[in-house]
Amino acid sequence: IIFKKLFFRSEHIRREERSKMAKLSTLLAIVLFAFAALSAKAFSPSPAFSSRPSSALGVSIKIDVGEGEPLESALRRFKREVNKSGHLMDLRHKRYFENSQEKVKRKIVQARNRKRLERMQKRRMQNRT
């Protein structure tokens, strides 16, 4: 009977020690994980450029408005410059995802239209003289 009491008492102490060790190891794992996450974030390289909206293309369009020039004509010239720069078309194409195959097809069509426009302008210039 005395042996049984001692055995159960020692078994109870072992359980308490195991639960304490399990708690300590869990706490240590959490602390190490948090430290690793913070240190990885601390040494990550900073971006070389400032963040800007994804729609910004870095195009600046300027027109000089003459003194006494009507607002409508200045606005018309500004719209013409925007269309020449192709800024709005680029924004339109970036509005939705475009895979590489679609992009190549679009570039081919754009080149074809550009060549056609150049031919038409060349003919006009020849007809002028």
Image (cartoon, grey):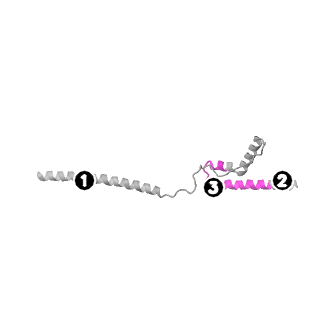
Q: Nearer the viewer, mark 3 or mark 1?
A: 1
Q: Which of marks 3 and 2 is in front?
A: 2
In this figure, which residue is indicated by the disc labeled 3? 101
Name the secondary structure under disc 3: helix
**Residue 117, x across and y down, in percent:** 77, 53
Position above or below: 115 against 79: below
Q: How far apart are marks 3 and 2 (CA)?
A: 35 Å
Q: Which of 124 and 76 is in front in this view?
A: 76
Boundaries of the magenta span: 90-119
Name which of mark 3 and mark 2 comes first in the sequence: 3
Q: Mark 3: few, some, or many residues within 10 Å (few <14, many ≥20)? A: few
Name which of mark 3 and mark 1 comes first in the sequence: 1
**Residue 77, x across and y down, in percent:** 75, 46
Look at label 2 and name its amino acid: Arg
Q: Mark 1: few, some, or many residues within 10 Å (few <14, many ≥20)? A: few
Q: Nearer the viewer, mark 1 or mark 2?
A: 1
Look at label 3 and name its amino acid: Gln
Label number found at residue 34: none
On the rendered structure, is 32 left or right of 122?
left
Q: Which quadrant, please, contains the C terminus?
A: bottom right
In this figure, which residue is indicated by the disc labeled 2? 124
Specify the principal SS of the magenta part: helix
